[in-house]
Amino acid sequence: MSETRSSADSADSRGDPSSGDRLRHRLPDPTQLSLLGFLSVPGYLFDAFESLQPFVLFFLFGFWPLLTSVTSDDADDPTAWVEMGTRSSRPFYLSLAYQQLNPYVQLQGIRQLLGHLPILARYRGRLPTPDRYVQSTSFHLPFEGEWTVVNGSPEREHSHSWGVLTQRYAYDFVITDDEGRTHTGDGTSPEDYYCYGEPVLAPADGVVVATNDGHRDYHRAGGWLDPTQRDIRGNWVAIEHDGGEYSLLAHLQCESVLVAAGDRVERGQQVGRCGHSGNSTEPHLHVHVQDHPDFFLGMGLPVQFDDVTTRTGPSASETTHSRAFLTAGDLTRPSRTETTR
C-alpha cells in the first residue's frame, strides 16, 4: 500500500521536535572547540608564545563524535533493524588505531578541520539549516531500486557527522534484504554485499568538477578500514549543479568512474559503481551536497530528494513524497524510474 504526500506533509510526518531537542540543536557542537587547539601551534614554534601551549588540549574535542558513538543508546537507533557486516566493534577500533599512522588520513582530517574556519566566516556563524536553506536544484536519488539509509539525517541526533561541517547532511546508502542484512555469507569480502558494483547515477543535471579513480577497493569488509587508503573518499565524482550546489558521490568501485572533469551529465546518467574504497567499513554509497567545489571548504547543505518513496522499516507501509528529507533507517527508492545511460 502506498500513500502520496506533498513536500510539506512529508516534512511534518517526521514529527515535531521537543523543546529539549530544539535546545540541543541550538547549542554548538563540541567538536568545533577542537579548532582552538590550533592556537597552541605558535606556542610550540616560538618561545614568546609558550603560554599558548595548553590550548593543545582542545584537540581532544576532535574525539567527541567517537565518544558519542560509543555511549549512544541503541534503543533510540532507527537503524537497529539493519544487520551490517560488523559483527564485532573490534575491527573498527583496531582500524582507527592504525589509521593514526596513515599520513594521508591525518592530513585530510586536519584539512577538514581547518576548512571550518572559512565556512564559519562565510556564514558568520549562521550555518544552513533545514528550516532556512532553500535549495536550487531538483535532486533525485542516485540509484535505481530500493536502498537503505544507514547513516544521515537533517536532524542532529542521526546526522552523518554533525561536527564535520562538510558532511553534516551527508547520507550513507546500502542495500538490505528482507531480513535487514546488507550482505550474504559472512560479509568478510566486498563481493558479499548487495550494493557492491551497483550503478551510481548523477542525482541532477550538471557539469563534472573533478573525479578520482584507481583507488583500490579494500579486500576486507565487515568493519575493517583500508590501512593504506590515500583518500578518505576513495574513488569519487563531484558535480556542479544550479545555484552553486555541488554533489559528491564517494567510495566508488575502483576503475568504475565513467566521467571526467568538464563532462556534462544528465540526471540518471551512470557515473560509476558502488564500491568499497577509501574510509569505508563495508561497501556503501556516500552522498552529500555542499556549497563549494572543494571538498575541504564546502559547507554541507540540507537538501531534499524529489519523487521518492520511503518506508521506515521492512514491515512498514510505503509513503510517496514529491520532495522529502531522508533519515537513518529509511528504505527509499525512486518513485519514477530513471533511465541509466
Image (spheres, rainbow, N blue to C red):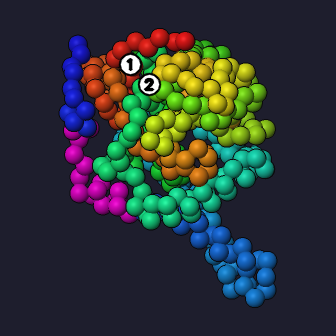
**Residue located beneath label 2 in the image:** 141
In the image, residue 322 lies at what x, y percent? 28, 26
In the image, residue 36 lies at what x, y percent? 59, 71
Q: Is residue 220 visible?
A: no
**Disc 2 to disc 1: CB gap under 8 Å:** yes
Measured Cα–Cα span from mark 2 to mark 1: 6 Å
In the image, residue 159 lies at what x, y percent? 44, 44
Identify which amino acid the numbered label 2 is placed on.
Leu
**Residue located beneath label 1 in the image:** 334
Give the number of marks.
Answer: 2
Query: Which is nearer the eye, 160 or 170?
Result: 170
In the image, residue 93 lies at what x, y percent? 65, 44
Q: Is residue 314 left or right of residue 71?
A: left
Query: Label 1: few (<14), some or many (≥20) within 10 Å?
Result: many
The C terminus: image quadrant: top right
- Identify the residue at image location x=47%, y=51%: 162
- Identify the residue at image location x=73%, y=80%: 43
- Identify the residue at image location x=36%, y=14%: 336
Stretch of the chain drawn in magenta: 12-27
Label 1 secondary element? strand
Q: Closer to the N terminus: mark 2 or mark 1?
A: 2
The N terminus: image quadrant: top left
